[in-house]
Image (tube, coloured by chain):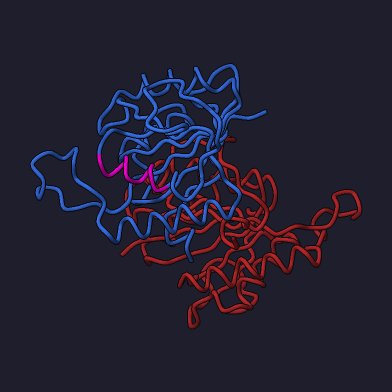
Chain colours: A red, B blue
Amino acid sequence: MSFEIYLVRHGLAGQFGDYEDDAVRPLTEEGQKKTRKVAQRLLDFGVTFDRIYTSPYQRALQTAQILQSVGLQSVGLGSTIEPALEPGLEIYDDLHPDGDQAVVLDRLANVRQLGLRVAIVGHEPDLSQLAATLVFGQPCDNLTLKKAGIIGLTAPIEGQLVGACQLFWLAPPRLLLG
Amino acid sequence: MSFEIYLVRHGLAGQFGDYEDDAVRPLTEEGQKKTRKVAQRLLDFGVTFDRIYTSPYQRALQTAQILQSVGLQSVGLGSTIEPALEPGLEIYDDLHPDGDQAVVLDRLANVRQLGLRVAIVGHEPDLSQLAATLVFGQPCDNLTLKKAGIIGLTAPIEGQLVGACQLFWLAPPRLLLG
């Protein structure tokens, strides 16, 4: 039994500054299209997610909904953490930009004994710093996660989580789509 | 100008123990085939290498030759470090299994100001530990590099090299080939 964590950065979104509230900045049409292609490709690889946790920001939420819409989400699992939008898709307040990494880590630690595959949809630099913490034991800025890119990690289901995860994928859309 | 380092693990090789000398253990036919597909895919992405440094072990040398045979090597650059087999392909003794990482780091530091793209073909866990050193500042066992898999890094062309590189790709053949 293993616990797999996939960190997915939201796709290309509208210009910062064009929206009064950054939380409502949506994916562009191109961003939606590319994100859908990436999601489809993940499905081709046989990836599915038991849970999809997403930042409440519009561009992340749309990205999570695209993952869900292509069928990347396993069915039949109820919500564990936040009020579920639909089965398997959960808004996760601490995933907003500059959210509290410690809270995210706590929650991951709490669900991992179920041996799930979870997707976390959010923002940079938060996601790559979370990955660095999980893999290396402390955050750093040296992992490059592009928009609609993905990081794949396996985590031990018990014991130390921080610094104990294996990084097995780090890919921009270009690498996934060819 | 940037310096890019691609770490490529040798493809699937014959069984350990079937050969008296591990240094002559060759790629299997399947290993050659998959490595060629990966190399072709890298070429499709527009990747080329100004230099290909390889471990002297047969399975790595064959992998390097496959990278070269599909045209991943830029032409016209002479040898800088070790006696060149052919332009751009250089046997690099410290890349044998359990080689001296400090020597490899020194040599990388010495060529980077040319702003090259180099491939380093070798073994595990040496390559992923080299990547961890370059990215996080010290080796660790938490990066998974599969056979014929690749890690892509950008390095600063001056100043500190250790802990100062960006990891932008980490992919097994499966992710590259779909």
> What residue is rendered at 42% in x and 55% in y?
B172
> What residue is rendered at 51% in x and 78% in y?
A78
Q: Nearer the viewer, residue B87 or B138?
A: B87
Q: Nearer the viewer, residue A93 or B118?
A: B118
Place of residue A58 in the rendered image (x, y in percent of width and height, measured from the top left): 76, 63
Place of residue A156 in the rendered image (x, y in percent of width and height, measured from the top left): 34, 53
Quadrant of the rendering where the C terminus of chain A is positioned: bottom right
Please tell me whether residue A98 is drawn above or below residue A110 in the rendered image.
above
Please tell me whether residue B164 is drawn above or below residue A163 in the rendered image.
above
Q: In the drawing, does residue A155 fall left or right of residue B12?
A: right
Q: Nearer the viewer, residue A174 or A103?
A: A174
Q: Nearer the viewer, residue A83 or A69?
A: A69
Please tell me whether residue B178 is drawn above or below residue B7 in the rendered image.
below
Q: In which quadrant of the rendered view does residue A55 lie?
A: bottom right
Place of residue A37 in the rendered image (x, y in percent of width and height, measured from the top left): 64, 69
Q: Which residues are magenta?
A: B58-66
Q: In the drawing, does residue A158 fall left or right of residue A45?
A: left
Please tell me whether residue B113 is drawn above or below residue A155 in the rendered image.
above
Q: In the drawing, does residue B68 fall left or right of residue A122?
A: left
Residue at the extreme bottom of the image, as rendered: A76
> What residue is rendered at 62% in x and 59% in y?
A121
Q: Is residue A66 magenta?
A: no
Place of residue B170 in the rendered image (x, y in percent of width and height, measured from the top left): 48, 48
Q: In which quadrant of the rendered view does residue B59 lie?
A: top left
